[in-house]
Image (cartoon, helix red, strand yellow):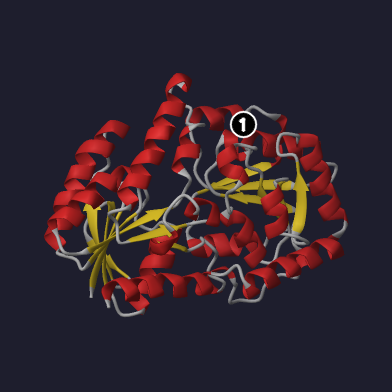
Amino acid sequence: MNVLHLTTVHPPFDPRIFHKEVKTLVKAGYNVTLIAQHKGNEEVEGVKIISLPAPRSRLSRIFSLALRTFRLALKQKAALYHFHDPELIPVGLTLKALTSARVVYDIHEDYPRQILSKPWIPSAFRKPIAWGMGLLERLAARFFDGLVAATPGIARRFPSSKTVVVSNFPCVKELTRQEETAPYQERPNWVVYVGSIASVRGAIEMVEAVARANAPVQLVLAGRFESAALQQALSGLPGWQRTRFVGWLNRRQVRDLLGTARVGLVLLHPLPRYQEAWPVKLFEYMAAGIPFIASDFLLWRELGAGAGLFVNPLEPQAIAQSIDWLLMHPEEAEAMGRRGRELVLEQYNWETEARKLLQLYEGLLS
């Protein structure tokens, strides 16, 4: 059965799209094609990738790249189209109207809430645009055959009869080191952050916190900066002397880094879109068996109870004190890491979510 995944925003090897959903479908016997921005057409791990060029601007991505995606998608004559970006809603609706295929909308974020804090949108226009996006999603959802929501909070906005929650939990095997792992208490005092390095994700507070920590700690940042200006600003802070930037890492390198670290950081600012999010990095730190320091949100306390410490993400001194406590109490920190891994093995794992995705596909294509 031929299925096609489409994205104009995410990279081709996005952890959720490629490493979780697409690879799950290939393993289940589906013929999967992925349309995404890439250097060229190729086949990777049984997945045919059709490349899109990098857009010149955000507007060209939304309009011209979306049109190109539609034309490529129509040629594939898939039995099911599965798209991952709200800007592709018109493409999904058109595919639904012109073909007999099933169409699935995968909602990664609460996009109306996300729009409310987008810095590139003038503040006066954010509420009307957010309202319009919410209306567009609700109206379009009536025509799509299936809706995949990344969190229960997102799912509540859509018809329950056609919506399935497929959480972005980690693949346990992917973050389990095959070789001998250094004993926790013998590891270097590395505090790590893996992901998009942005001001609203606590980048400034993390660097300021390691400068205030009493313990001889090193902050390891892995990912990409949201802007060159942010990287330059961070490099001027005193804490940058205790910071090592390693750039973007593939999944194996992420596994190895977490297997050497003492603490994981996930310090998103208290924006509405984050307070109800299920942070992927929180679960990845837990899967790797290391304690975390996370934003003190009520939902996050429930998700990661006993597996880490919770702080005000806007207070570098509080973050520094949490770092010191975990490094000075290695036995308690190691026990937190074990509890986190047990939670992932029991419930917060992709293997459980994969079954939900396959059940949706079986129901739509039977």
Residue 316, x across and y down, in percent: 75, 35
Residue 327, x across and y down, in percent: 82, 54
User: Circle 1 sits on which residue?
Assistant: 234
The part of the image, by quadrant, that contains residue 161 is bottom left
Horizontal relation, residue 12 to residue 97: left or right: right
312 vs 265: above or below: above
Residue 15, x across and y down, in percent: 45, 59
Horizontal relation, residue 354 to residue 301: left or right: left
Horizontal relation, residue 40 to residue 283: left or right: left
The quarter of the picture where the N terminus appears is bottom left
Badge 1 amino acid = Leu
The local secondary structure at tag 1 comes to helix
The part of the image, by quadrant, that contains residue 311 is top right
Return the residue nearer the eye: 243 or 345: 345
Res. 132 in view? yes
347 vs 253: above or below: below
